[in-house]
Amino acid sequence: MRNNCIDYHEIAVNSMEETKKAVEEQNKAVEDTENIFSEISNSINELIDKVQQVTDSNIKMSDKKNKIIAMIENLSAIAEETSASTQEVSASTEEQAASIEEVSNYAGDLRELSKDLRNIVNKFKTESN
């Protein structure tokens, strides 16, 4: 019986050591799992920060895009005004060129009339001499 008790005692001690070892392994596994979840949590927090930075960048780019569009629209309006002014100047220049041509024609006509008048006056001068 004593041998039986010693055998049971050794079995109990071995069982307790194995249980202790299993508990230590489980504690280590829990600790490792906790570390992994902590790393995952940190990674998620970093990812949230990065997503927020991307969102902020997108908002800034959208604002800049809207400003550029407004500038392009403004430049387009200025270009249209400049084009209209250029067309007006061109039309005015054409009118002035036509007027100059007309004055030149009148000057030519006056020159011819002046020659005719001079010839008539010279005719009268020679007849009266």
Image (cartoon, rainbow, N blue to C red):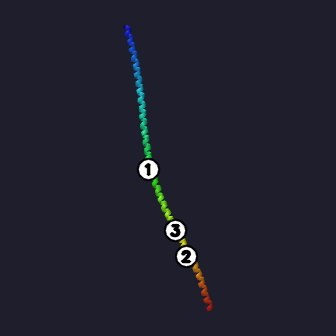
Kindly identify the amino acid type of the residue bearing the numbered disc 1.
Asp
Q: Please state the horizontal and vertical placement of residue 29, each as a whole percent of the image.
A: 42, 26
Q: In the rendered image, which quarter contains the C terminus? A: bottom right
Quadrant where the N terminus lies? top left
Give the x, y percent position of residue 99.
Answer: 54, 73
Element class at badge 1: helix
Q: Are marks 2 and 1 in contact (CB under 8 Å)?
A: no
Residue at image point 44% right, 48% down: 60
SS at mark 2 in the image = helix
Vertical placement of residue 91 versus 118, above or below: above
Rounded to the nearest angstrom, the CA distance separating label 2 from label 3 is 18 Å
- Residue 24 sits in which quadrant? top left
Q: Residues within 10 Å of mark 1 (few under 14, many from 20)?
A: few
Tell me the residue that label 3 is attached to: 91
Image height of 15 relative to 125, above or below: above
The first of marks 2 and 1 along the sequence is: 1
| Mark 3: secondary structure | helix
- Which numbered disc, 2 or 3, marks the residue that appears first in the sequence? 3
Instruction: Find disc 2 in the rendering and name its residue.
Output: 103
